[in-house]
Amino acid sequence: MVKSRQIDLLISSLPGIGVSEADQLDRMRALEQQLVAADGECRTWIARRDELLDKCDRVILELSRRKTEIESS
C-alpha cells in the first residue's frame, strides 16, 4: 500500500509535455534517490520503535515481577 502511494506520488510529480527526455530521466533519478533516502529513514525509525517497545516490555515485566515479590512477602 505504501509503495503504491509512493508510485502514485512519483507519477504525479513527473514533468509534463515540453520537457526533454534527459530532464525527465534526471528528475526520475532525483526522485528515486529521495525515495531511497525516505525508505532508509523509515527503516531507522522502525528499528527505533522496536527498541523502545522492547524496553517498555522489559520495564513492564520488571514491574510485574517486583509487584509479585511484594505481594508474596
Image (cartoon, rainbow, N blue to C red):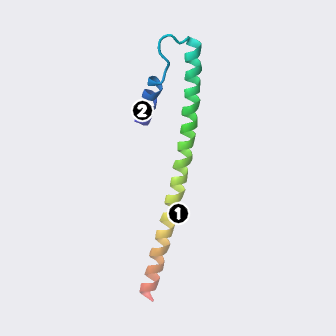
Callout 1–callout 2 Cβ contact below 8 Å: no
CA–CA distance between discs 1 and 2? Answer: 32 Å
Please name the amino acid that badge 1 sits on. Answer: Lys
> What's the residue at 42%, 85% (across, down)?
71
- Residue of label 2: 5
Q: Position of residue 68 (x, y in %)?
A: 43, 80
Q: Position of residue 13 (x, y in %)?
A: 47, 24
**Residue 18 badge:** none
Q: Is residue 46 above or below residue 29?
A: below
Q: Quadrant of residue 40?
A: top right
- Is tag 1's residue or tag 2's residue first in the polypeptide sequence? 2
> What's the residue at 45%, 89% (across, down)?
73
Q: Quadrant of the N terminus?
A: top left
Please name whichever residue, 68 or 42, is drawn nearer the observer in this view of the structure: 42
Q: Secondary structure at mark 2?
A: helix
Q: Mark 1 Cα within 10 Å, few/some/many (few <14, many 20+)?
A: few
Please name the amino acid that badge 2 sits on. Answer: Arg
Q: Mark 2 Cα within 10 Å, few/some/many (few <14, many 20+)?
A: few
Please name whichever residue, 12 or 36, is drawn nearer the observer in this view of the structure: 12
Q: Position of residue 3 (x, y in %)?
A: 45, 33
- Residue of label 1: 55
Q: Position of residue 4 (x, y in %)?
A: 42, 31
> What's the residue at 44%, 24% (across, down)?
12
Q: Is residue 55 above or below residue 22?
A: below
